[in-house]
Amino acid sequence: MAHIIKILDGFSFIPRKELTLLEALEQQDVVVEYQCREGFCGSCQVNLIDGEVVYTTEPIAFVPEGKVLTCCCQPDSDLTIEIPGGCKVKAKGR
């Protein structure tokens, strides 16, 4: 079943099932901070407002309650997230 990702102050979309949350956001041209893509550094944290995720790789970085690492999780239900600094979309063609 497809899950909807809603970004506060942004928009909603339905990602492909096999993508991590980070990959799904990147496909929508949403700017998300990241470094390692493997759950080591924690720089890709977003606020999980509502919903559930499943980690494809158990993160090594500390993940505070109410946050998720986008690089190593996938939606397990419809999600509402808040991106630190707000939702920014890359300009097309750049």
Image (cartoon, rainbow, N blue to C red):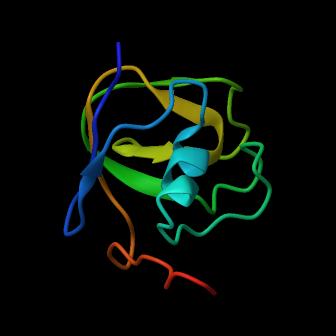
Locate residue 88: give its quadrant.
Answer: bottom left
Vertical relation: 94 (above or below) 80: below
Nearest the camera: 65 or 14?
14
Q: Residue at coordinates 25% horizontally, 50% vertically from top-left?
A: 12
Residue 55, percent from left and from top = 58, 25
Q: Residue at coordinates 77% horizontally, 43% vertically from top-left?
A: 38
Nearest the camera: 94 or 67?
94
Vertical relation: 18 (above or below) 90: above
Residue 19, percent from left and from top = 60, 34
Q: Residue furthest toward the top?
A: 1
Vertical relation: 73 (above or below) 90: above
Residue 51, percent from left and from top = 26, 30
Q: Residue furthest toward the front?
A: 93
Q: Is residue 69 visible?
A: yes
Residue 27 lies left or right of residue 4; in this view the side is right
Vertical relation: 3 (above or below) 49: above
How many marks can you see? 0
Nearest the camera: 9 or 57?
9
Residue 81 lies left or right of residue 45; in this view the side is left
Q: Quadrant of the C terminus?
A: bottom right
Q: Is residue 62 visible?
A: no
Q: Residue at coordinates 43% horizontally, 76% vertically from top-left?
A: 89
Residue 78, percent from left and from top = 26, 29
Q: Residue at coordinates 44% horizontally, 37% vertically from top-left?
A: 15
Locate residue 1: give its quadrant.
Answer: top left
